[in-house]
Image (cartoon, rainbow, N blue to C red):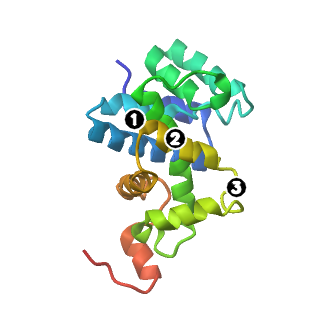
Amino acid sequence: MLTRDDAWTLLCEYTRGDSLRKHALAVEAVMRAYARRLAEDEEKWGMVGMLHDFDYEMYPNPPDHPMKGSEILREQGYSAEIRRAILGHANYTGVSRDTLLARGLYACDELTGFVVACALVRPNGIWDLEAKSVKKKLKDKAFARTVNRDEVYEGAAELGVDLGEHIDFIIAALRDVACDVGLKPPSDALAGAGTTKSD
């Protein structure tokens, strides 16, 4: 039975960059939160979130990513369901997102990265970020330009969630792992803004 520790070891073997590791942890946290909300397997959803880009640093060009990664995951003993969900997060693979797990990853991947980018440019970081601010940034094509806006909108639609509620859910999940994913803890963020923490 493969564990989260196994997934983290595999991620670190193929991914040296700190930013990509933090992205993996961020998407893992959001996927785990959605698994709890939807009464799905939290460990499985978390692994998919953590490993979806584990091969990207070594194989950055499509279709090597995520096809090469899928081969490695198969050799490591990861299930066909996990591998298929990861393949489905890249539209150019042609693998349909025919499970809730696959649709969950697609809905969370790009948007989680975008929410983190929004938090990083705010004085209070993630702690006072709201969906309306994220939506406004989505319309600014110059901001976080590598994020595919079409995939953000498509992902929410495929998962069957309102975009604003989806963004707020991701923000809440990221607050729980803020320090792990490179976001300031609330006391630091609020102190830096010259405010005090309130409940």
For numbered disc 3, what is the local secondary structure?
loop
- The amino acid type, in three-letter code, at marker 1 is Gly
Q: Nearer the viewer, residue 38 or 163?
A: 163
| Closer to the camera in the image, 85 or 184 | 85
Quarter of the image with the N terminus is top left
Circle 3 Cα neighbour tier, 10 Å, few/some/many (<14 / 14–19 / ≥20): few
Marks 3 and 1, Cα distance to the nearest angstrom? 27 Å
Q: Is residue 8 visible?
A: no
- Element type at marker 2? helix
Q: How many marks?
A: 3
User: Relative to 57, is 18 on the left or the right?
Assistant: left
Give the image location of residue 24, x and y in percent: 51, 42
Spatial separation of the CA atoms under disc 3 and disc 2: 18 Å
- What's the residue at 24%, 74% (across, down)? 199
Residue at image mark 3: 145
Q: Nearer the viewer, mark 1 or mark 2?
A: 2
Residue at the disc numbered 1: 46
Q: Residue furthest right?
A: 61
Please name the residue shown 30% across and 31% down the image.
40
Query: In the picture, residue 60 is in which quadrant?
Result: top right
Percent position (x, y) of residue 133? Answer: 51, 68
User: Relative to 9, does residue 163 appear above or below in the rendering?
Assistant: below
Q: Secondary structure at mark 1?
A: helix
Of circles 3 and 2, the one toward us is: 2
Q: Which residue is mark 2?
A: 155
Instruction: Name the N-terminal-most of marks 3 and 2.
Output: 3
| Relative image position of residue 74 (x, y in whole percent) | 52, 14
Q: Can residue 198 be seen at all in this image of the molecule? A: yes
> Residue 89: x and y, percent?
56, 32
Q: CA distance from mark 1 to mark 2?
A: 18 Å
Q: Nearer the viewer, residue 35 or 178?
A: 35
